[in-house]
Amino acid sequence: MTGDNDSPQAQLLNWIADVGIDGFGILQSAEQVAEDHRSQTKSVEDAIDSVILWRTTHAAGTGFVTGLGGIAILPIAIPASMAASYALGANTAAAVAQLRGYDIRSDQIRTMILLCLIGEAGEAILRNAGIQISNKSA
C-alpha cells in the first residue's frame, strides 16, 4: 500500500489502514484490541468472536451518535460516520489478523484488511486478479 501514489484515493486508503492498525484517539491499536480480547477468553476463536461482537455493538452505537444531529448536520455527519465505520472495520479486520498470527504491518496484510472492507466486491476483485495473473503467467 505504501508507494509514490499520492492520489486522494491512495491517501484515504492509507489513512484507513493506518488508523485500523495503529488506532486513533479513543480507538485502540489492533494489537491492543487483540491482546485485550485474547487475555479475557479461553481460545483464539473465542477472542475473534469477542472482537467481532464488541465491534458490531460499537459500530451500532457510533452510527446512533453520529445521527443525533438530524438533517442539519448531515453534510458533516455522513462523512464522519463513514470514516468511523471504515476505521472500525479496518481495526476489527486487523485485530482478527493479529489474533491469527499475521504481520498486520506488511503490505500484503494491509491490502487484505482493506479488501475486507469492500465485502463481496472484494471477491470479484480477487477473482479478476487471479484470472489476470493466470493469463499473464500462461
Image (cartoon, grey):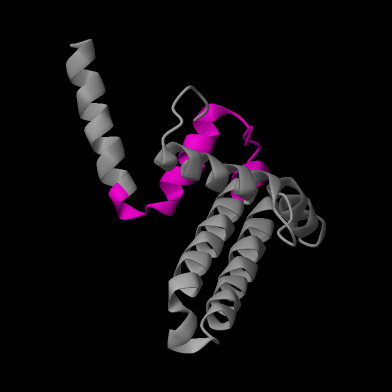
Image: 84 above or below 23: below
List x then y, in percent, for residue 90: 55, 51
Nearest the viewer among 109 and 86 is 86
Q: Residue 102: percent from the left, percent from the top?
A: 62, 35
* Residue at the image point whose x is 49% and y is 30% from the top: 1
Indicate left or right for 99 with 12 as reference: right
Q: Does residue 89 belong to the magenta stretch? A: no
Question: Is residue 43 placed above or below 78 in the rendered structure?
Answer: above
* Quadrant placement of the C terminus: top left
Q: Residue at x 65, y 44 (%)?
A: 21
Question: Image check: 13 left or right of 48?
Answer: left
Q: Main secondary structure of the magenta part?
A: helix
In the image, residue 73 sits, relative to residue 40, either above or below, namely below
Residue 91, position in %: x, y? Answer: 61, 53
| Name of the residue lying farthest toward the top | 138
Question: Which of the two residues, 112 or 82, is positioned nearer the viewer here?
Answer: 82
Q: Which residues are magenta?
A: 96-121
Q: What residue lies at 61% left-to-right and 66% top-to-bottom? A: 55
Task: Tell me where residue 77 appears, x and y as whole percent.
Answer: 50, 74
State the residue lying farthest toward the right: 39
| Number of numbered discs overlaid on the protein picture | 0
